[in-house]
Amino acid sequence: MRTLSLLACGAVLGLVVLATNARAADVPVNKLPPEISTALAKRFPNAKPVKAFTEGTDHLEVVLQPQKAGKPVGMTFEVVFKRGGYRLIEKEITVKSLPVVVTNALETKMPGAKVAKAQEVFNAKNVRIFYTLAITFKGKGGEVHITPAGKFVVEP
């Protein structure tokens, strides 16, 4: 609980600093507020920040690369900070590894949609809450969020 409190304080301070200092969407990882860098290092000691960006004034995403013996291993994942604290962990997965319930829900609601990228999304307690799919449907790109039970939801 103490870690989450630190993360929340760091994220709020960090987002205020980023919102006032960075007009562009990209944020250099060496310019992350110390509170966020420390919280990430503590929560994910075997991962290195490789990219960070903002989406609006209250949303910061940090892309982390798992490391073993100082070398990258596996797929990157993202940690999302929103005003009030650390909220989500997004792990990229292969489209083929999506559960049948999720692919069936997409096909039922959006027949013919093509999935270009898939992510598992976990909350701060490491519970899977939904999948984010980058899709193309009727010639237009977009993103949908589907729970493990196959229900479409809006990203929190």
Image (spheres, grey):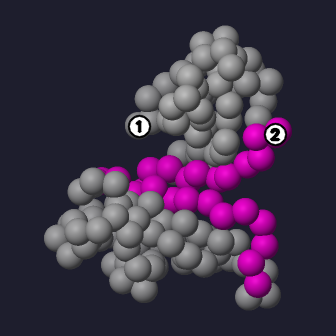
Q: Is residue 123 magenta?
A: no
Instruction: Decide: is 40 above or below 138.
Output: below
Residue 132 in the image: state x and y as whole percent.
58, 38
Question: Dot 1 lies on which element?
Answer: loop
Residue 59 in the image: state x and y as whole percent.
34, 55
Q: Disc 1 versus disc 2: distance between alpha carbons?
A: 24 Å
Query: Which of the two discs, 1 and 2, labels the residue nearer the N terminus?
Result: 2
Magenta region, main secondary structure:
strand
Residue 137 in the image: state x and y as whole percent.
58, 26
Please tell me which residue lies in front, 42 or 58: 58
Residue appearing at x 34%, y 78% in the figure:
33
Residue appearing at x 34%, y 54% in the figure:
55
Give the residue number, with chain letter if any, for mark 1: 156
Residue appearing at x 62%, y 60% in the figure:
77
Give the residue number, with chain letter if any, for mark 2: 97
Callout 1, which amino acid?
Pro
Callout 2, which amino acid?
Ser
Number of other residues with Cα within 10 Å of mark 1, as a class: few under 14, some 14 to 19, many 20 or more: few
Residue appearing at x 17%, y 70% in the figure:
20
Please tell me which residue lies in front, 35 or 137: 137
Q: Which residues lie in the magenta part? A: 71-97
Q: Nearer the viewer, mark 1 or mark 2?
A: 2
Number of other residues with Cα within 10 Å of mark 2, as a class: few under 14, some 14 to 19, many 20 or more: few
Question: Dot 2 lies on which element?
Answer: helix
Q: Report the quarter where the C terminus lies.
A: top left
